[in-house]
Amino acid sequence: MTHTRYAFIKANWHADIVDRALEGFQELIPAEQIDVFDVPGAFEMPLMAQELAKTGQYAAVACAALVVDGGIYRHDFVAQAVVDGLMRAGMDTGVPVLSVSLTPHHFQETDHHMAIYRDHFVQKGREAAQAALMITKTREQAKGLAQAA
């Protein structure tokens, strides 16, 4: 029996927080159905997502990153470029590319903020898995309708 496969790309920047998204994702989709790929940071995710989507092996590609405000406005440009790139990767390949990429305002590396975002990334991972499962099911239904017509 074959199982639907999913790709999960995670940025290594703030990995102690970002990796938690994979934990949430795996609460709904079994780990043996997920191929995990690490990239240096958020900016590298769109190209990796596009390459993985083009293989035809995945029903969806989820991408997780934390883009923080380091005191300069560059993070806004990075976040926008990443989200645009992920959307383009999905549109160009026809494979859903999901974003668990967050850009918090006023992020500080305090114990309090770190705990909040670790928990938040677990929830966002769950939400990405729900979206992946739902879009996979919906696309299968649509394909069935097209074949019946």
Image: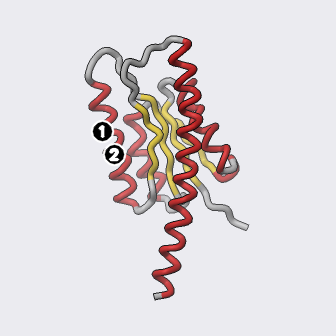
Assign a secondary structure to mark 1. Answer: helix
Q: Is residue 147 left or right of residue 43?
A: right
Q: Residue at x 31, y 45 (%)?
A: 84
Label 1 crowd bin: few (<14), some (14–19), many (20+), radius 10 Å: some
Which residue is under mark 2? 85
Percent across and percent down for residue 42 are 41, 34
Which kind of residue does numbered mark 1 sit on? Ala
Q: Are marks 2 and 1 in contact (CB under 8 Å)?
A: yes
The crowding category of the residue bearing disc 2, from other C-alpha atoms within 10 Å (few below 14, some 14 to 19, many at least 20), is many
Q: How many marks?
A: 2
Q: Position of residue 12 (x, y in %)?
A: 51, 29
Above or below 117: residue 54: below
| Residue displayed at 48% across by 42% down | 63
Residue kind at label 2, given as amino acid type: Gly
The residue indicated by pointer 1 is 81
**26 relative to 136, above or below:** above
Secondary structure, mark 2, is helix
Q: In the displayed structure, does residue 70 sit left or right of residue 143?
A: left
Toward which corner of the image does residue 85 lie, by quadrant? top left
- Across and down, in percent, residue 8 comes to 55, 45
Quarter of the image for the C terminus: give it.
bottom left
The residue closer to the viewer here, 14 or 124, is 124
Q: Which mark is residue 62?
A: none
In the rendered image, the residue lying farthest to the right is: 1
Residue beneath the point at 46% across and 48% down: 98
In the picture, measured across the screen, residue 32 lies left or right of residue 100, that is: right
Could you give the CA–CA distance between mark 2 and mark 1, rounded to whole angstroms? 6 Å
Which colour style is shown?
A: secondary structure
Quarter the N terminus occupies: bottom right
Which residue does the image show at 40% across and 26% down from the upper left? 104
User: Where in the figure is residue 7, as x and y percent of width and height?
Assistant: 55, 49
Residue positioned most to the bottom: 149
